């Protein structure tokens, strides 16, 4: 039985909880509504973090102490926090994903092919719910990095949009658009479960969705 400790009990934490309950071979070891609750948690096999970037400091100390792997499903880390993650990966297995959707990660491969083959101009349009803190999203920045970090990114924050990313390529009289839409946040919870299954048997280091694909 895989025991998952959930850190962060916002919308994604709650959806992850409900998703885990649908599996017969996974159970919730505990839910930390606040990172300070980590010390009160029961035994677990892997921690999944859906909280905030600042939580990485306490998570790094706790998971190193317990020698347990971690799935980081948070975006918007500072350069200092990125360094903490790199150092953490030298001590325990770390799964890092700007986006846990299988579709988005297939999309990354598609736009890499298009970008290398065509060399057309491109812009990114990304839409998320109005409570998302970072803009542009971590996924948009990752997609831009694949094409050209300087390409324009248009961020929209409205309503309850789970997530939509479009890359529009254009040259002369031709337009090619690649779009991914998440109809619900459950796709990210399912991705987190896949990541947890993978990371519990991995060695020290940093991993991402490419390792699953």
Image (cartoon, grey):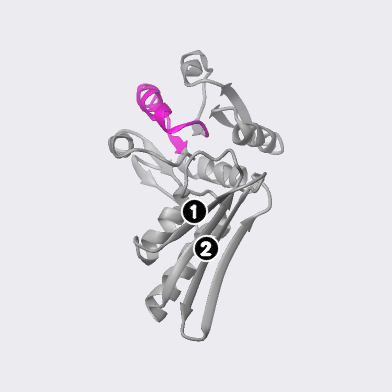
Q: In front here: 56 or 158?
A: 158
Residue 116 rendering spot, x and y as whole percentages: 38, 75
77 with respect to 194 (left or right): left
Which mark lies nearer to you, 1 or 2?
2
Give the residue at x 40% y 60%. Answer: 144
Q: Which residues are magenta?
A: 50-71
Residue reaching furthest to the bottom: 173
Labels 1 and 2: the sequence-earlier one: 2
Q: In front here: 95 or 83?
A: 83
Residue 123 visible at all: yes
Secondary structure under badge 2? Answer: helix
28 with respect to 118 (left or right): right
Is residue 56 covered in magenta?
yes
Q: Is residue 17 above or below residue 151?
A: above
Q: In front here: 127 or 87?
A: 127
Q: Quadrant of residue 32?
A: top right
> Which mark is on residue 183?
none
80 with respect to 108 (left or right): left
Residue 1 visible at all: no
Number of other residues with Cα within 10 Å of mark 1, as a class: few under 14, some 14 to 19, many 20 or more: few
Residue behind mark 2: 106
Residue 88 rendering spot, x and y as whole percentages: 32, 34
Q: Quadrant of residue 77?
A: top left
Q: In front here: 116 or 45?
A: 116
Secondary structure that dominates the magenta span: helix
Give the residue at x 63% y 30%. Answer: 27
Q: Is residue 164 above or below residue 71?
A: below
Number of other residues with Cα within 10 Å of mark 2, as a class: few under 14, some 14 to 19, many 20 or more: some
> Which mark is on residue 212?
1
Is residue 3 covered in magenta?
no
Secondary structure under badge 1? Answer: helix
């Amino acid at each position: 039985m895989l025991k998952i400790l959930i850190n962060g009990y916002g919308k994604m934490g709650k959806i992850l909880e409900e998703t885990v309950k649908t599996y017969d071979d996974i159970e919730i070891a505990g839910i930390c509504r606040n990172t300070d609750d980590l010390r009160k948690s029961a035994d677990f096999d892997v921690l999944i973090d859906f909280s905030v970037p600042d939580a990485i400091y306490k998570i790094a100390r706790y998971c190193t102490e317990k020698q347990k792997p971690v799935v980081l499903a948070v975006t918007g880390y500072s350069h200092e926090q990125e360094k903490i993650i790199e150092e953490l990966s030298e001590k325990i297995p770390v799964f890092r994903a700007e986006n846990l959707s299988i579709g988005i990660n297939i999309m990354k491969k598609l736009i890499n092919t298009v970008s290398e083959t065509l060399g057309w101009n491109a812009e990114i349009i990304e839409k998320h719910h109005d409570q998302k803190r970072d803009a542009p999203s971590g996924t948009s920045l990752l997609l831009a990095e694949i094409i050209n970090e300087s390409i324009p990114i248009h961020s929209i924050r409205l309503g309850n949009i789970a997530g939509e990313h479009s890359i529009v390529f254009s040259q002369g009289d031709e337009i090619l658009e690649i779009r991914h839409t998440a109809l619900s946040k459950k796709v990210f919870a399912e991705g987190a479960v896949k990541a947890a299954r993978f990371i519990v048997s991995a060695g020290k280091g940093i991993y991402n969705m490419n390792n699953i694909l």
